[in-house]
Image (tube, rainbow, N blue to C red):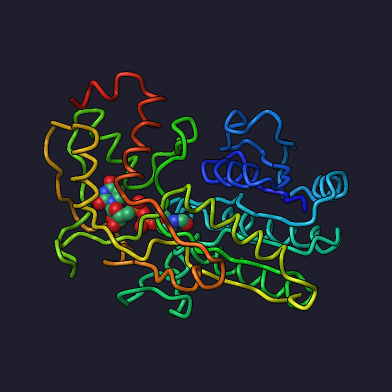
């Protein structure tokens, strides 16, 4: 088996490449380095610079490397940005996926793992989100991920692919400091940025119907997330021709929630932040009070469960933050 990993030089991609290569899987990475970083990848990993939107490049890469499976991670993924430029999100995340699937079918590739998102659920009004919870995405980003799942499953049924759609919950942490997320778009890095600059972290609303009034999310360590991709790839590889056309769609979360307040307090403890206390601001539009995964289907179908807790995530993310920002640790002490 050789897996083509699109977006493999990204934050999550580099962790998936690390997990799969360490497990002995052969991979080739395709990344246009628009947000990916080549140095995140070991030098001995096959790398192709370019876009999954380039059909000719896809055909050449699939043939030249004997690709038999795809892990599709490359996408545009900022919820806020997707509201501003929805057509770019639909072009890259849906049209681009269509181009990739056409190359997959034409190239005789039979296994496809797709990076989906908890964003497909929108504002689920349940204690634990199962894969049968209605999908009502609230952002163009979430819509493109749900439409992507439809495309993947339809292509799987029509062309005998074996597919897996992994719905990521809130990803954080790093398996090694040099692999830490370089984006500052989500809670943990945004709070790191505030405490590093001596500013008050912002809590977007504390009047939600939750135990401490702040939003509750299911944080998943990126190393656990990467292992889930390895488990999915092996599941699809292990199935015989009888499984052609079958899909497995699973939540990738811990099955446990943590509130914004809990995360902000944990970050203060881990970073030694002595600056101003968190400032509660107005709610952020579109934020559900609680989004926590049921992780039972991933355990049953993939034989996978998360192993890291939020302290592991915050500690490892902070080590990566400080690696790129010498002096950050001193600034918060
Ligand atoms: C988390 C909570 C904010 C910043 C993300 C991705 C989405 C999907 C799921 C992958 C919210 C609060 C944040 C801050 C705050 N992942 N917050 N102050 O919105 O749950 O969704 O994970 O596909 O694509 O966007 O994550 O980190 O933006 O926010 O109070 O400075 O933290 O209101 O309740 P979100 P987030």
Q: Identify the residue at image location x=78%, y=64%.
A: 110
Give the mark count.
Answer: 0
The answer to whether residue 83 of the structure is visible from this angle is: no
Tell me what residue is drawn at x 44 percent, y 72 percent.
296
Front position in the image: 130 or 300: 300
Image height of 309 relative to 201, above or below: below
Q: Is residue 5 visible?
A: yes
Q: Quadrant of the C terminus?
A: top left
Quadrant in the picture for residue 105: bottom right
Picture quadrant of residue 43 = top right
x, y (%) of residue 49?
72, 36
Residue 12, image x, y percentages: 53, 46
In this image, 216 relative to 253: left or right?
Answer: left
Give percent across and percent down for residue 149: 60, 69
Q: Nearer the viewer, residue 141 or 212?
A: 212
| Depth check, front residue: 326 or 143 | 326
Q: Is residue 190 shown left or right of residue 212?
A: right
Image side of residue 204 versus residue 161, left or right: left
| Image position of 189 with respect to 152: above or below | above
Q: Quadrant of ligand 1?
A: bottom left
- Please give the name of the residue rendered at 80% of the width and 49% of the height, measured from the top-left corner: 58
Q: Position of residue 124 (x, y in %)?
A: 36, 74
Q: Quadrant of residue 237?
A: bottom right
């Amino acid at each position: 088996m050789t897996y083509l990993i699109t977006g493999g030089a990204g934050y999550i991609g580099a962790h998936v490449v690390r997990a799969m290569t360490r497990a002995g899987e052969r991979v080739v990475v395709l990344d246009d380095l628009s947000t990916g970083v080549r140095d995140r990848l070991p030098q001995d990993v096959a790398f192709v610079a370019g876009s999954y939107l380039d059909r000719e490049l896809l055909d050449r890469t699939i043939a030249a490397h004997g690709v038999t499976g795809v892990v599709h991670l490359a996408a545009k993924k900022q919820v806020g940005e997707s509201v501003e430029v929805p057509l770019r999100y639909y072009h890259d995340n849906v049209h681009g996926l269509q181009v990739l699937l056409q190359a997959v079918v034409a190239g005789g590739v039979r296994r496809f793992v797709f990076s989906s998102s908890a964003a497909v659920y929108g504002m689920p009004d349940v204690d634990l989100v199962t894969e049968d919870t209605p999908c009502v995405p609230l952002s163009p980003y979430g819509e493109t991920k749900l439409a992507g799942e439809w495309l993947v499953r339809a292509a799987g049924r029509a062309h005998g692919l074996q597919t897996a759609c992994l719905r990521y919950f809130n990803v954080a942490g790093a398996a090694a400091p040099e692999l830490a997320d370089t984006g500052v778009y989500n809670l943990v890095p945004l709070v790191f940025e505030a405490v590093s600059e001596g500013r008050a972290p912002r809590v977007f609303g504390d009047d939600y119907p939750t135990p401490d009034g702040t939003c509750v999310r299911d944080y998943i360590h990126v190393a656990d997330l990467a292992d889930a991709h390895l488990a999915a790839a092996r599941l699809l590889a292990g199935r015989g021709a009888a499984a052609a056309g079958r899909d497995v769609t699973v939540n990738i979360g811990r099955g446990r929630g943590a509130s914004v307040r809990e995360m902000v307090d944990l970050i203060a403890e881990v970073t030694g932040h002595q600056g101003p206390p968190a400032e509660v601001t107005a709610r952020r539009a579109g934020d559900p009070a609680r989004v926590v995964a049921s992780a039972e289907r991933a355990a049953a179908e993939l034989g996978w469960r998360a192993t890291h807790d939020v302290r592991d995530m915050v500690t490892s993310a902070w080590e990566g933050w400080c690696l790129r920002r010498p002096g950050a640790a001193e600034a918060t002490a």
